[in-house]
């Protein structure tokens, strides 16, 4: 079964997600600090780290991005909309 390791930042609106992504790309803030500062997910306290999980463990929209071969490793992608809000996702490993 397919598994992945990822981290994410979860926020309530798309505009904020895009703003954080720009800050990450420009190097204005590190992913770990952004997760602690902005993420509404309990994983924010762990610098956004979700650990390893299997396909089907996360909501559909999240899974589709994480397990897509088109999603590059170690690059921030998103915002990805789910029932929880908007995610910025970084896939660290996938197999």
Image (cartoon, rainbow, N blue to C red):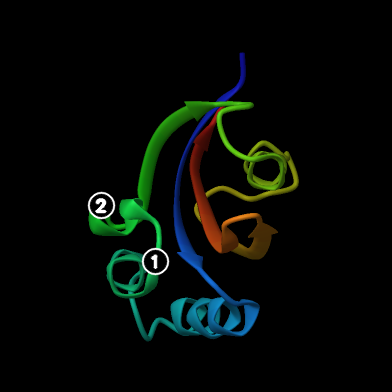
Dot 1: few (<14), some (14–19), or many (≥20) neighbours within 10 Å? many
Q: Residue at x 59, y 63 (%)?
A: 85
Q: Residue at x 54, y 85 (%)?
A: 19
Disc 2, SS: helix
Instruction: Indicate which disc residue 49 carries.
Output: none
Q: Is residue 3 left or right of residue 80?
A: left
Q: Is residue 50 left or right of residue 70?
A: left
- In this view, the residue farthest toward the top is 1
Q: Residue at x 39, y 66 (%)?
A: 39
Dots 1 and 2: beta carbons under 8 Å? no
Ranked by sequence position, the earlier of labels 1 and 2 is 1
Q: Is 47 placed above or below 92 here? A: below
Disc 1, SS: loop
Q: Mark 1 to mark 2: distance in Å? A: 10 Å
Q: Is residue 13 left or right of residue 10?
A: right
Q: Quadrant of the N terminus?
A: top right
Residue occupied by mark 2: 46
Q: Quadrant of the C terminus?
A: top right
User: In x, y percent, where is residue 18?
Assistant: 60, 80
Q: Is 30 placed above or below 28 here? A: above
Q: Residue at x 71, y 47 (%)?
A: 61
Q: Is residue 19 left or right of residue 39?
A: right
- In this view, the residue farthest toward the front is 83
- How many numbered discs? 2
Dot 2: few (<14), some (14–19), or many (≥20) neighbours within 10 Å? some
Q: Quadrant of residue 52?
A: top left
User: In x, y percent, where is residue 37?
Assistant: 30, 74
Residue occupied by mark 1: 39
User: In x, y percent, where is residue 43?
Assistant: 33, 51
């Amino acid at each position: 079964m397919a598994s992945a390791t990822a981290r994410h930042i979860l926020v309530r609106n798309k505009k904020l997600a895009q703003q954080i992504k720009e800050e990450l790309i420009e190097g204005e803030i590190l992913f770990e600090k952004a997760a602690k500062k902005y993420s509404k997910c309990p994983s924010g306290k762990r610098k956004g780290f979700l650990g390893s999980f299997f396909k089907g463990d996360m909501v559909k929209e999240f899974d589709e991005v994480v397990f897509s071969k088109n999603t590059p490793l170690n690059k921030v992608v998103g915002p990805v909309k789910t029932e929880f809000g908007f995610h910025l996702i970084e896939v660290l490993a996938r197999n």
